[in-house]
Amino acid sequence: MPTPHNAAAVGDIAKVVLMPGDPLRAQFIAENYLEGVVQFNEVRNMFGYTGTYEGRRVSVMGSGMGVPSIAIYSYELYHFFGVDTIIRVGSAGGLAPQVKVRDLVIAQAACTNSNFAAQFSLAGTVAPIADFNLLREAVNTAEEMGFRYHVGNIFTTDVFYGDLEEYRPWISMGVLATEMEAAGLYLNAMAAGKRALALGTVSDLPLTGESLTAEERQTSFTQMMEVALSVAGREYDKYCD
């Protein structure tokens, strides 16, 4: 059924959804990778599309920026539209010294300074983690495609313009990169008994100031998209065929 944020009807959205933050990146994926594309949402300009990739039904939809935004859209996809799997495809800021611009980061787990998990009233600290099978498929796919990648912990922050020195304690704990959505997605998937994975292309290194140009981002992000689409296809074969 439609929601205040999504005009789709049940059945318009595939079981597996790629979710970039930028709705224009969703449009790019739909136009360049999917066949037979139908747009199912443009409410608030948060574009969503369904098509096929190598004969497998896949959807792609923007999430917006930050935990609250991706939390709304992913909750609705999981609970109201029959989605089983969401794969985030976004940008990330590299933190660990071995992480370079253009690298792919596959998020095994997401530390966070967000208070989003408080709603679950857990008597302790929850660890937002990826679905292992998705994680394994992404690693295998990146290996097969010959892409440079890292697997490990990331940091989901609520603060974009903050004190860069605050990253250093996270670096000392082995965190690879920072972004703003993965922890919210992982927590929603865990609470719903669904599957999620966050992939990030390193677009900049906050502590050094190194950053990709807009053109370089478009070229580099295609590697992440190809990994995500391959994983989505394998998900379709497992659960949707």
Image: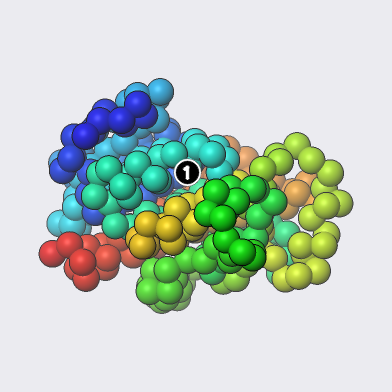
Residue depicted at 56% across the width and 43% down the height: 67
Number of residue marks: 1
Residue drawn 36% across the image and 50% down it: 18
Instruction: Find numbered disc 1 in the image and state the secondary structure of the residue it sits on.
Output: helix
Q: Viewed as shown, does residue 180 lie left or right of 22?
A: right
| Image position, residue 212 (x, y; %) | 64, 45
Left or right of 70? Residue 81 is left
In the image, 223 versus 69, the foreground residue is: 69
- The residue depicted at 48 percent of the width and 58 percent of the height is 186
Q: What x and y, as percent, mark residue 172?
A: 80, 69
Q: Position of residue 177 (x, y in %)?
A: 66, 59
Q: Is residue 216 visible?
A: no
> Which of the 4 quarters of the picture holds residue 138?
bottom left
Q: Residue 17, can we see it?
A: yes
Question: How has the structure been colored for display?
Answer: rainbow
| The quadrant where residue 134 appears | bottom left
Crowd around label 1: few <14 · some 14–19 · many ≥20 (10 Å):
many
Q: Quarter holding the C terminus?
A: bottom left
Q: Is residue 146 left or right of residue 209?
A: left
Taking depth in this image into account, of 110 and 34 the one nearest to the observer is 110
**Does residue 191 sit above or below 28 in this rendering?**
below
Residue 205 percent location from the top left of the image: 72, 52
Residue type at tag 1: Ala
Task: Name the residue furthest right.
Answer: 165
Q: Which residue was labeled with disc 1?
A: 71
Q: Nearer the viewer, residue 62 or 219?
A: 62
Residue at the (57%, 61%) spot, across then down: 122
Residue 234 drawn above or below residue 61: below
Q: Quadrant of the N terminus?
A: top left
